[in-house]
Image (spheres, helix red, strand yellow):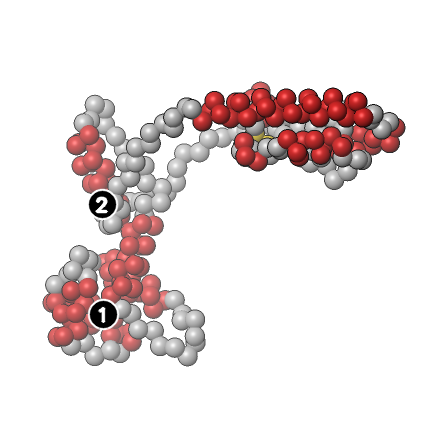
Amino acid sequence: MNPKEAAQLLGYCSAFDNRKPSEAAAIAWSSALDDVPLDADAKAAVDAYYKTPPKDPEAKLWIMPHHVRTLRSKIRSKRLENFQYEPIEGETTAEYLTRYRGQVQAIASGRYPAPTGRLALEGNPSRQFMQELEARGWEGNRYVDEDERPVEAELIDSVRRSGPLGLVCPTCQAAIGRPCKTPGGSEKQPLGKPRAKPHTARLRASSGRQEQTAEQRAAEEQRIREMSARHLARQEADEDIPDAEIVDTEGDAA
């Protein structure tokens, strides 16, 4: 934006805030917006600024060059929300970069209509697929990180826990320390949800359970220690596998 164009933009701003544009102001604005053209988006940025009421109702709105730059960038980025690159078969890296930047600029500037939406997968995952996810550590709607899994002391403490959560549920097979779950497996609900109360069979088993002997507790604790050792061994083995390199091909949307 040169001083003449900056003067035109200041004249447009004056219609909102009654400022008195000057030659010095035009030179200053052109210096601050030297890489921003005087286009429809620059004027739309001014419109957007004066559409938003100030936090203090008594304050007077007074747009500055950085407001124009920031709001213009948001306007252009909004058009790229659903952008997907349209490749051609056999294109080289140079051709890809040229076409990618061209598509981004065409959509961001408004010369090409912005995509209205993306294709979405329909339907729910199969029961077999969800069972495989659950076997790999999927709980609820996320993967349980290895660091979140109970350590040895917590596992031993769960064995000693009193009440229904101190044993595996005979109905839903909920693990020690885990709440019972409702039946799952339907298309709308592939996984069961936690129940507010334990199953009746779990309550009965808990009330009729006899106190463990010292030998039984020692054997159970030894089993937990062995499980923890195997878990740590697997974790150390996983750390030896290098992460895959991720290449970022994101272009400049400005």
Q: Secondary structure at mark 2?
A: helix
Disc with the residue nearer the chain's start (2 vs 1): 1
Estimate the x, y position of residue 26 in percent, counting from the top left.
15, 71
Picture residue at 29% right of the left edge, 76% below the top? 17
Estimate the x, y position of residue 180 in percent, counting from the top left.
72, 32
Q: Secondary structure at mark 1?
A: helix
Estimate the x, y position of residue 199 in percent, counting from the top left.
79, 31
In this rendering, position of residue 157 left or right of residue 19: right
Depth-wise, is mark 2 or mark 1 nearer the camera? 2
Picture residue at 26% right of the left edge, 41% below the top? 251
Disc 1 crowd rating (10 Å Cα; few below 14, some 14-19, many 20+) is some
Disc 2 crowd rating (10 Å Cα; few below 14, some 14-19, many 20+) is some
- Cα distance in 3D space between marks 2 and 1: 25 Å
Estimate the x, y position of residue 163 in percent, counting from the top left.
80, 35
Picture residue at 33% right of the left edge, 29% below the top? 245
Picture residue at 47% right of the left edge, 22% below the top? 237
* Type of amino acid at the residue the image marks with label 1: Tyr
Q: Nearer the viewer, residue 124 or 138?
A: 138
In this rendering, position of residue 112 left or right of residue 212: left
Residue tagged 1:
12
In this rendering, position of residue 104 left or right of residue 213: left
Quadrant, the N terminus:
bottom left
* Type of amino acid at the residue the image marks with label 2: Gln
In this rendering, position of residue 35 left or right of residue 76: left
Residue tagged 2:
105
